[in-house]
């Protein structure tokens, strides 16, 4: 693991430089992307680089980690809308190469296995970006006694729904379920970049990086990955 500690507010630039280098090094990059407040500054820098002509997205294929179940795709809080607003609509990515699990599929089980196959057909993910929830979740893999390996439907923890209620008008509006890549899907990425910034994540990050490897702290399973880069402004 490589741990990069940065000053508050600097993680976006540092992450964008490294992420852009990965994209530039590949002929047909397959990237895994994340939502949440954490990657927003990194996306801003990627947009700047794209608009200045330094970084080309035309050959990029992207798979997002997760999507809520039951929210219309165009709902302002769907992860599809989030990614359009924070990255895709400002860069020259081909929208046909932008993938999300469909949280409104008639058969969610079929959708999950199809998403898994699509990632494999694309050749697997070259670099996966991750944030971390206060309870240690990655994507929407919530703390559990078992490891959900592949893309699956996840019941959201109350604490996750409470945390994400800030984006909705009330907690009742926050979906109760989501589709998420599983732990194995995530660990199959050739490289992983975990971004952790903002208030109050030092303790969970410490547990994830140096504690027991356990599905009770899903991010701790990242310790098993040989090419993990962690960028944080937390004092750990
Ligand atoms: C959400 C997402 C995760 C994200 C996490 C942390 O629930 N599903 O992918 O990493 O929350 O979000 P934030 O960066 O806003 O703290």
Image: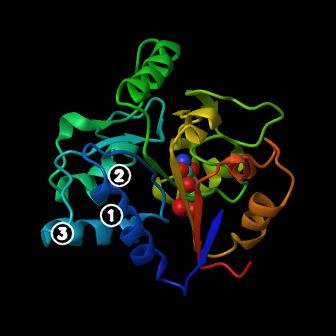
Quadrant where ligand 1 appears:
bottom right
Residue 234 placement, left or right of 98: right
Q: Is 214 above or below relative to 203?
A: above
Q: How is the image coloured?
A: rainbow
Query: For the residue labelled by badge 1, is the local secondary structure a helix, a strand or a loop?
Result: helix
Cα–Cα gap, marks 3 and 1: 9 Å
The residue shown at (19%, 40%) is 95
Cα–Cα gap, marks 2 and 3: 24 Å
Q: Nearest the camera: 162 or 78?
A: 78
Q: Are marks 3 and 1 in contact (CB under 8 Å)?
A: yes
Q: Is 86 above or below relative to 185?
A: below
Comes first in the chain, label 2 or label 1:
1
x, y percentage for residue 16?
A: 37, 69
**Residue that label 1 marks:** 20
Task: Judge whether residue 164 can be spotted in this image.
Answer: no
The residue shown at (55%, 28%) is 151
Q: Total of numbered circles in the picture? A: 3
User: If the image is split into quadrants, where does the N terminus sit?
Assistant: bottom right
Give the quarter of the image for residue 64: top left
Comes first in the chain, label 3 or label 1:
1
Residue 171 placement, left or right of 20: right
Cα–Cα gap, marks 2 and 1: 20 Å
**Residue that label 2 marks:** 82
Marking on residue 54: 3
Marking on residue 184: none
Q: Residue furthest right?
A: 212
Dot 2 crowding, Cα within 10 Å, few <14, some 14–19, many 20+: some
Task: Judge whether residue 118 can be spotted in this image.
Answer: yes
Query: Which mark lies nearer to you, 2 or 3?
Result: 3
Q: Residue furthest bottom?
A: 7
């Amino acid at each position: 693991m490589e741990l990069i500690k940065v000053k508050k507010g600097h993680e976006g630039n540092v992450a964008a430089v490294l992420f852009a280098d990965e994209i530039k090094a590949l002929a047909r990059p397959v990237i895994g992307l994340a939502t949440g407040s954490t990657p927003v500054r990194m996306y801003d820098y990627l947009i700047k680089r794209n608009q200045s002509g330094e970084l080309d997205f035309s050959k990029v294929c992207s798979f997002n980690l997760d999507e809520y179940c039951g929210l219309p795709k165009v709902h302002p809080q769907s992860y599809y809308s989030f990614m359009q607003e924070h990255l895709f609509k400002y860069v020259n990515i081909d929208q046909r190469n932008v993938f999300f699990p469909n949280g409104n599929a008639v058969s969610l089980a079929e959708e999950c296995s199809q998403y898994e196959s699509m990632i494999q057909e694309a050749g697997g993910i070259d670099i996966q970006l991750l944030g971390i929830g206060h309870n240690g979740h990655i994507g929407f893999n919530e703390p559990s006694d078992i490891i959900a390996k592949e893309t699956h439907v996840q019941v959201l923890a109350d604490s996750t729904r409470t945390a994400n209620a800030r984006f909705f008008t009330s907690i009742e509006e926050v979906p109760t379920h989501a589709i998420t890549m599983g732990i194995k899907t995530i660990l199959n990425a050739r490289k992983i970049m975990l971004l952790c910034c903002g208030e109050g994540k030092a303790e969970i990050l410490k547990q994830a990086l140096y504690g027991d490897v356990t599905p009770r702290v899903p991010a701790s399973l990242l310790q098993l990955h040989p090419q993990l880069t962690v960028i944080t402004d937390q004092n750990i």
